[in-house]
Amino acid sequence: MRHLVLILAALLSLPAGPAPAQEARLMILHDHGNPVVSEMVRLRIRGEYDLTVSLEDMQFPNSPDYDWMQIARDDWHKERVNGRLRQVFERQVALFPRRVGPLQVGPVSHRLTYVTPDDGRAEIEVVAPPVTLNVKAFPGGYTPLAASRLTLTDELSAQPGSLKKDEILTRRVTVEALGALAHSLPPRPDLRQPWMISFTVPETRETVLTAQGPVARVVWEWQMRPQTGEPAILPGTGFPWFDTDSRQIEVAPLRPIPFGFAGFGSNFGDAGAAGARNGLIAAVALAAGVLAGMTLLARHRGMLPPTRLRGLWRRLRPSPHRAALRAAAARGDLGALRRAAEAHLRWLGLPVTGLQALDRQIYAESPPAGFDARHWLRGFLRDARRMPQPAATAACQRAP
């Protein structure tokens, strides 16, 4: 009995030490383990403590292999775990992988100061074991940009094809991507053209925290006016991004716009140039009159339905999308080239076909080498001219 009393006294005299391991557990949880490069992975660092915590300190580890940011305030609450009431800690972190391959995150340590049964204070360090993410290459070899939602807003201060003399057109483009960081958004497009004077306003780029997660935002602004006044098309452009919901590459388009002065040729041009243009207009009007007469005759005799006649009429006119097609092919912008090609087919009243080779080059994970955009465009325009008009139901698609 005396020995038992001595043992109990010795145990009570020992200093308070760390809490038993089963009373404190820390974990790194994630929503998915197979992201592509730059795709946001939501981490939840969860601690379950059978302790009364008075102070805490957690440092999430930095790494050259990923970017990260905390996306919500730390949450402390009581929760029953396996039937026992625990003090639960949760921290939300958004992680963005920078490279392909296995990516280790952690370990993460949480240093706690807790209240002991005798109202004293003691410290314990709880460690969460690391987790591994299997990061995949960004599809198609494009500059990585992954988001669950992306919106592009294109605002114009005036009608770009009907500008007044000395009027300046302001173009403001805003791109917002949910689940991305601002530095992953693309650089400002180059809209310079030899027939246009343009000035750029310094861009604004930021990452904003919302209830749905981080939103990357960039605003581009240009001030433009015609230099010669001749009507032209400001080519469209765009950039690819990975939709993390559909798991597919999408293209955010910056549409082509007509650009020039209103009434050009009668108000701002010289007499000789105006006369030449008027002669051209007269010739076009004459051809249009002849074609209109043939059209009425054919319709009267039931030779061609109206939808097919519209397609034939458009084939005799220059496509408004040719400038965008050539510009996109010249600079190798395959996304813009596809959008212009689709618009060209719809303008002709044709189905959207014949783009398989271009689609493979854009969307394939390992696109074929040696693709020549200009060579493809020549073949595409030739085939579009030879393509037969579809049936009335297909031909009635309205062009943009």
Image: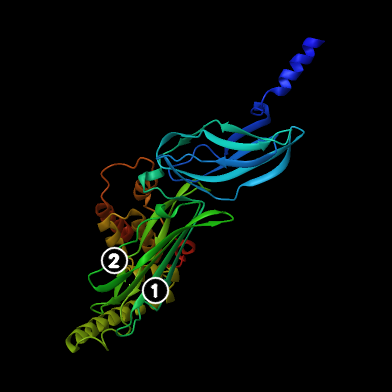
In this view, the mark in front (2 or 1): 2
Q: Is residue 394 left or right of residue 293?
A: right
Q: Report x, y in % for residue 310.
A: 40, 71
x and y, in percent, of residue 88 in the image:
67, 40
Can you say which quadrant of the picture contains the C terminus?
A: bottom left
**Image quarter of residue 197:** bottom left
> Which residue is rendered at x = 77% and y = 10% of the image?
3
Question: In x, y percent, where is residue 336?
Answer: 35, 58
Sequence-first disc among 2 and 1 = 1
For the residue marked with disc 2, what is the amino acid? Ala
Q: In this image, 186 relative to 104: left or right?
A: left
Q: Which residue is mark 1?
A: 298
Could you say whether the residue bearing mark 1 is in a helix, strand or loop? helix
Badge number at residue 323: 2
266 and 240: which one is in front? 240
Q: Camera-side residue: 322 or 182?
A: 182
Q: Is residue 228 above or below residue 240?
A: below
Q: Is residue 240 or residue 54 the one in the foreground?
A: 54
